[in-house]
Image (cartoon, helix red, strand yellow):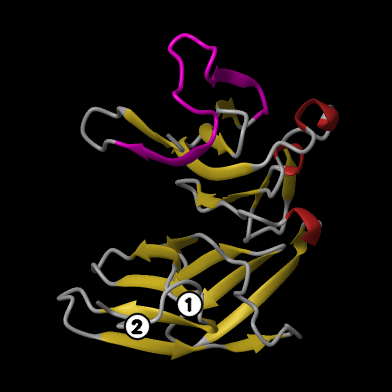
Amino acid sequence: NVFAKTNQGWGNAMRGICQNAEGEIFFLHEADTAAIYRMKKDGLGVEKVALKSSGIKEQYPLRSAKYLVFDEKRNCIWTMTNTLLKIDVENQRIESFTSVTFDREYSTFNPIDLFPDGRILVGNTLDKLCIFDPESGNIEKLFEDNPSKYFRIYPKVLMVEAEDRFWVGTHDRGLFKFNIEGDLLQHYHTESTPALPNNHVSSIYQNGKDKTIWVGTLG
């Protein structure tokens, strides 16, 4: 047990986890949102990495972060609050990309994922979903032409399936599949065929061998 606490309730939850190619595991903890933790690949040691912010005024910049993704190409970790954040673990720095910022009122789940080419998929509501290129700074808004179609649908989890398509698990509207042009490819819910047991999708996983998609729901 990494955090051996006897008290119950708040302060015991992990808020994000990812792994690099070397097998090191990185995670957030809700009781310390100014740092990230690193577990060695042998699982025998955990290191707290205090982070120094670059142009971020908040004392606890990771307070609302829920997901982490490791970027092997840039050797960093990306996460999302209401603003996109880049974590440089080796240099203990955290940097804010204010060009990718969403309304704080709707920043509840803050999912994020990476495309194979290093572009970033983010959005705290489905109508604001976008693809950000850290190299060029370009932001591609997927539903800019018709945002009202997906207004206030809250993504709970994002999963890139390939370089041109991705899945979105939502808080109460089921599971969507889109291509990078913003076209809806599939939508599964409690009344679709096949049907989901619940429209609250909490996790999506793709089997690396046969590419089967596994979905976790709330009940």
Residue lying furthest top: 193
Residue 131 versus residue 188 in the image, above or below: below
Q: How many marks?
A: 2
Q: Residues within 10 Å of mark 2 (few under 14, many from 20)?
A: few
Q: CA distance from mark 2 to mark 1?
A: 9 Å
Residue at horizontal 73 percent and vertical 83 percent from the top: 58
Residue at horizontal 46 percent and vertical 15 percent from the top: 195
| Left or right, residue 41 beside residue 54 | left
Residue 20 at x, y percent in the picture: 32, 65
Residue 184 at x, y percent in the picture: 63, 20
Residue nearest the observer in this picture, 142 or 67: 67
Mark identifier at residue 11:
1
| Left or right, residue 82 beside residue 62 | right
Residue at horizontal 62 percent and vertical 55 percent from the top: 110
Question: Looking at numbered disc 2 in the image, what kind of residue is underneath it?
Answer: Lys
Residue hosting label 2: 5
When asked about the image quadrant of residue 155, the answer is: top right
Label 2 vs 1, first from the N-terminus: 2
Mark identifier at residue 159:
none
In the rendered image, which quarter contains the N terminus? Answer: bottom left
Does dot 1 land on a helix, a strand or a loop?
loop
Does dot 2 land on a helix, a strand or a loop?
loop
Q: Are marks 2 and 1 in contact (CB under 8 Å)?
A: yes
Residue at horizontal 74 percent and vertical 85 percent from the top: 55
When asked about the image quadrant of residue 81, the answer is: bottom right
Whether residue 7 is in magenta: the answer is no
Question: Looking at numbered disc 1 in the image, what kind of residue is underneath it?
Answer: Gly
Residue 13 at x, y percent in the picture: 44, 69
> Where are the magenta residues, as a range?
181-206
